[in-house]
Image: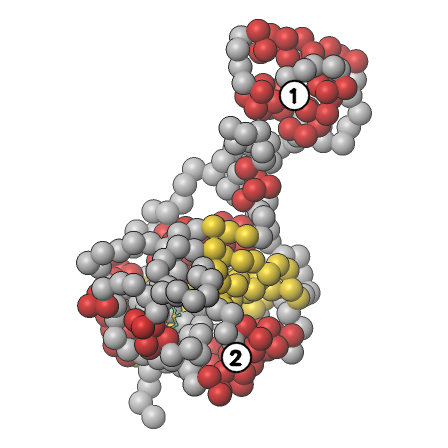
Amino acid sequence: MAAPTIERIGEHLFVNADCIRGAAAHLADGSVDLIVTDPPYGIEGDRLDRHYNRDERFVDDGYVEVDARKYASFSRAWIAQAERVLKPGGQLYVVSGYTNLYDVLGALRKTNLREINHIIWKYNFGVYTSSKFVSSHYHILYYAKPGSRRRFNLQSRFALDETAADGRSLNYRDREDVWSINREYKPGQRKNKNELPKALLKKILAYSSKEGELVCDFFLGGGSTAAVAIGMNRRFVGFEISEPTFRSRVPDLRKIVPGSLLEAEPDPHVVRNRGKSWSAAELEQLEGRFRELDASGATRSAIVATLSAELERGAWAIRKRLRSAGTKKV
Ligand SMILES: C[S@@+](CC[C@H](N)C(=O)[O-])C[C@H]1O[C@@H](n2cnc3c(N)ncnc32)[C@H](O)[C@@H]1O
């Protein structure tokens, strides 16, 4: 058998091979921090055009599907490799449709990986149905390898005390396990049959990795996980079995500027006084500042955010105190 094509872009590695053999050959035990991957769904992904309402001229040829009858053994084989290569505390996110979800969950449960969340990703795009409900979600199975502390960057996207206009916590809302993220509309651009939106990948990488860590995708496709990983200054390794897909998509990844997707981190407002009892001076400050801010016409959420920053306490504690002090506005 001919040796697989390997492309290196800086410190990132791309292998044109079956991920099961590729991981065995190129990845040492316990070497990867985070795997984010989207395997073929075993539903004739090579004929997804029958389901989606889009112009297929721009969709890459060469998508390799897995025979539905072999889906369970295929899932067990690649997930066993994923478990092997993860570091203790390393994490795995698998995107799955519902048709063969049973096999993916079965394979995960045969490992020692621990379930962290079962996330529902709700998306928008045209799947034709007229005699049943419209399918508009995927499953994201979030697992971790036991043996060390798992990274979860709690305030990577929103500080704990950031609130929306309706006063609800942005951090809490962002961490609910139903994610509503639209697919990217890319008219006239090349795409894989089933490309993941960058917003979804940025969210996963922001919570579950840090700069310099090694991110891996077993099923590269159009390379969106790679593009986001490089854009967020992570190291990357990935596999794609299809030669046409590999040849058409990997060269584009050279154009990604490392770090270009990193945004200014929110100021992770450290809630230094969380859980401490309130002193008389603090209560006086709370009520005095509340009256001033209220008189200035500030909204309820702006008042709470300001008091939370000034007193270094969470928004919930501020609201509770204000209520017990009898202020009507919160
Ligand atoms: C659902 S797509 C991945 C899409 C990708 N996440 C993206 O955003 O573009 C699955 C990809 O896995 C590839 N594939 C199928 N079997 C494979 C295998 N055994 N090893 C590596 N890649 C494989 C397919 O050719 C296809 O490109």
Q: Quadrant of residue 313?
A: top right
Mark 1 residue type = Val
Which quadrant, please, contains the C terminus?
Answer: top right
User: According to the image, label 2 marks what residue?
Assistant: 75
Whether label 1 lies within 8 Å of ligand 1 gets the answer: no
Image quadrant where one finds the N terminus: bottom left
Residue placed most toward the observer, 128 or 15: 128
- Disc 1 on helix, strand or loop? loop
Q: Ligand 1 shows up in which quadrant of the image?
A: bottom left
Based on the displayed image, in which of its 4 quarters is residue 221 positioned?
Answer: bottom left
Residue 194 visible in this rendered orientation of the protein:
yes
Mark drawn on residue 62: none
How many dots with numbers?
Answer: 2
Q: In the structure shown, which secondary structural element does the residue marked by tag 2 occupy?
A: helix
Find residue 321 and report its horizontal and vertical position in percent.
Answer: 73, 21
Q: Position of residue 255 (x, y in %)?
A: 25, 56
Viewer-closest of 100 and 29: 100
Residue where numbered disc 1 is placed? 330
Structural distance between the alpha carbons of marks 1 and 2:
51 Å
Q: In the image, is 41 to the left or to the right of 5?
A: right
Task: Note whether 308 is above or below 170 in the view shown.
Answer: above
Q: Nearer the viewer, residue 187 or 258?
A: 187
